[in-house]
Image (tube, rainbow, N blue to C red):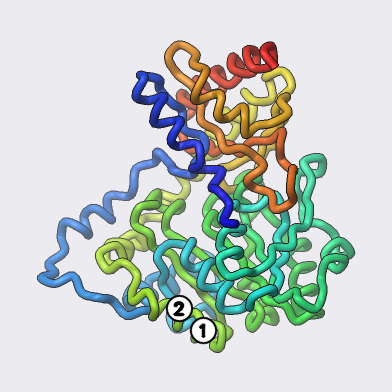
Amino acid sequence: MMPSSPIRKLAVYAEEAKKKGTHIYHLNIGQPDIETPTELWQAVHSMQKKILEYSPSNGYESLRIKYAQYFQTRCNLPNLQADDILITTGASEALFFTLLSILDENDEVIIPEPLYANYIGFSRSGNIKVRPIATSFENGFALPSIDEFEAVINENTKAILICNPNNPTGYTYSYDELNRLKALALKHDLFIISDEVYREFVYAEQEHISLFSFEDLAQHLILVDSISKRFSACGARIGMVATKNKEVLETVLKFAQQRLSPPGLAQEAAKALFDVDKDYFVAIKKEYQQRRDTIVGLLNKIDGVACHTPNGAFYCMVQLPVADTDDFCKWLLTDFNYNGATVMLAPGSGFYATHNKGKNEVRIAYVLNSADLTQAAKCLEEALKVYCSEK
């Protein structure tokens, strides 16, 4: 059965609340309120096309070259070339095509949980089994040990999938952790899919390390990326798959050919984003770090609430003093408002493949400005007082 999205399944209740005049602070979805760089809009306005034609199924070469240059110059991945890249309709399509390209029906992919909810849906579409491996709130969602991985590897295991920095936890993997994954992949002849769409958002003293920097892993690695979060261009739907494994890339291309082509207009606009000055990244990283510090500080002041300080992305998994956050998150939209406002959260259970886990957790996306985050935290604090007194 295809699972509902924990991020979007409560949307109908949110719409009803808005019709009643309730203001909703959307912390349920990773839709930044950061303005998309003007370079994209200027590229759209300056287009001189007479026909909006199909693009090649692997995307315009000019965009693949831009993407490769970005990886070479900004990410210190000199071996990644345009011919290693295939453009997709967002990272979602990249992940879907990749899973179907390297796993057959009843094959298994290991994914540390909590995990990005759509990984489950993509896998079920191909009758692929997700084999979750637990991380814990208590140790900050760090990568499990080699022994824990090897305990779930069997003859059906074909791949490991990670998100780095992680959605939904914000955890960012260290060199040692990635090196352990490399050793596992080489020992057991597994693929690793590395979802790195939040690579620009790593805080404190830590730096993002791409698995693509491990050259001896090249034939085992598939990299997934997107412009959506990096440039606040979620609606453009431009992502990509990159791998040095030509057989994998050729198989991904077969799926890409079936859907004909990625969006042509968005590809033309996306090229301009790779010319954005590096100061842009410095500014938005500073902004997100401020938002992180604001929301984490406020959440941990609320009675019964616990939240780690994430090192990357713009999400955090938060423990609440309630037994069922699916019920609580719905209640926030149907039965509660504080001074005419409420907050929309993503129930934690949807980020686990293991049944009944995450029932006291929510994912919060700190994609609003600090003033709105402050008001949202106040709404949550007042809501918990009411809800806990009623239950």
Is 377 situated left or right of 47 in this image? right
Q: Which residue is mark 1?
A: 251
Q: Measuring from the top left, give residue 2's x and y in whole percent.
A: 57, 56
**Residue occupying image coordinates x 69% and y 49%:** 352
Alpha carbons under labels 1 and 2: distance apart: 7 Å
The reply to whether residue 69 is in sight is yes
Instruction: Using the rendered image of the protein, determine whether residue 65 is visible from the camera's viewpoint.
Output: no
* Quadrant housing the N terminus: bottom right
Q: Quadrant of the C terminus?
A: top right
Q: Which three-letter amino acid code belongs to the residue tagged 2?
A: Phe
Residue occupying the far front of the picture: 1
Query: Within 10 angstroms of label 1, few (less than 14), some, or many (20 or more) residues?
Result: some
| Local SS, label 2 | helix
Question: Which residue position is annotated with label 2?
Answer: 255
Q: Kindly indicate whether the residue at mark 2 contacts the one at mark 1 (C-beta within 8 angstroms).
A: yes
Between residue 143 and residue 134, name the one nearer to us: 134
